[in-house]
Image (tube, rainbow, N blue to C red):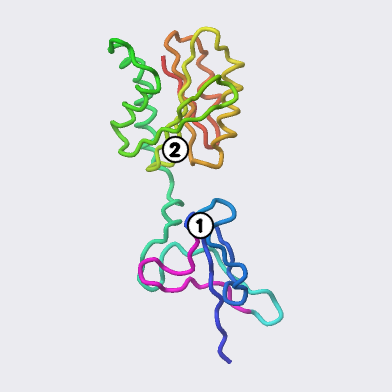
Amino acid sequence: MLILRERMLVCRAGHLITERLTSRPDLRLPRCDRCGADTLDRCDTCGHLLGGAWPSHGLDPIGSQPPTVCTACGATFPWAKLEEPLAEDALGKLEHLLCRLPRVMRELRPRPDLDVLVRAVLQIHFDDVRPELRTPRYALGNCTAFHLPEIEAVVVPHHVGSGIEEDELSRRWEEDVHTYRDRCRTLVFFLFDPERRLPERIAPAWTRNHVRCVVAG
């Protein structure tokens, strides 16, 4: 008796939609219900179908995790690239740029807006810098965050001026973490502190999990 294997449906971010697409075509989705990415059931390169669960008599089908490469042509699937560890040297370069930013600011006349300067220096190491206007609850107007798709990071700059105390920055940190927790792999909470008012413990205390806090003054 020929046992037919089920087909798998996966989104481009690697979320498994179903491993029973053959017997349950009603489970097909054009987009992922978790992240909104397009779905696929075959290799983009050669069209080979993604193998799903194997039927087992009297039991639910037994499947596996989405493969990282096509078993027919060897092409790498989109989600495999997302599983690669974030390059520490790229993050290191980013933090170095931000830490040197106050020195650059002091050399320029007239002194540019912080967002303008951050966008300019990011171009040194990153080809794709995407500004995003947002209106957080802690601001009266728009603020700018910078997406760096090549390292899946977001930089959120904050100017620590007079009247902005640690409690206020902590509130901003919490809101930024909540806003970007599902939208990037690394959130860089950047505090531009030209008067060096912040204690040294801030950066290590607010660097945790997927968040890196960089203080420069």
Q: Amino acid at mark 2?
A: Ala
Residue visible at 43% across and 46% down? Answer: 85
The residue under the point 53% across, 18% down is 201
Up/down of 104 relative to 195, above or below? below
- Callout 2: helix, strand or loop? strand
Q: Residue visible at 59% across and 66% down?
A: 18
Relative image position of residue 145 (x, y in whole percent): 45, 30
Quarter of the image for the N terminus: give it.
bottom right
Task: Please name the residue that numbered disc 1 is placed on.
Answer: 14
> Marks 2/1: CA distance?
19 Å
Q: Are marks 2 and 1 in contact (CB under 8 Å)?
A: no
Q: Position of residue 152 (x, y in %)?
A: 43, 42
Q: Is residue 77 magenta?
A: no
Residues shaded magenta:
38-55
Which amino acid type is shown beneath numbered disc 1?
Gly
Screen quadrant of the C terminus: top left
Residue 43, above or below 57 = above
Q: Is residue 141 left or right of residue 217?
A: right
Dot 2 surroundings within 10 Å: few (below 14), some, or many (20 or more)? many
Magenta segment: does it hold 54? yes
Q: Quadrant of residue 76?
A: bottom left
Looking at the image, residue 213 sits to the left or right of residue 120; the answer is right
- SS for callout 1: loop
Q: Quadrant of residue 47?
A: bottom left
Q: In this rendered view, identify the residue nearer to me: 174 or 54.
A: 174
Q: Does residue 72 appear left or right of residue 166 in this picture?
A: left
The residue to which callout 2 is attached is: 153
Q: Residue furthest right?
A: 58
First in sequence: mark 2 vs mark 1: 1
On the image, the x and y values in percent for residue 107 come to 28, 12
Main secondary-structure element of the magenta-colored stretch: loop
Q: Position of residue 126 (x, y in %)?
A: 32, 36
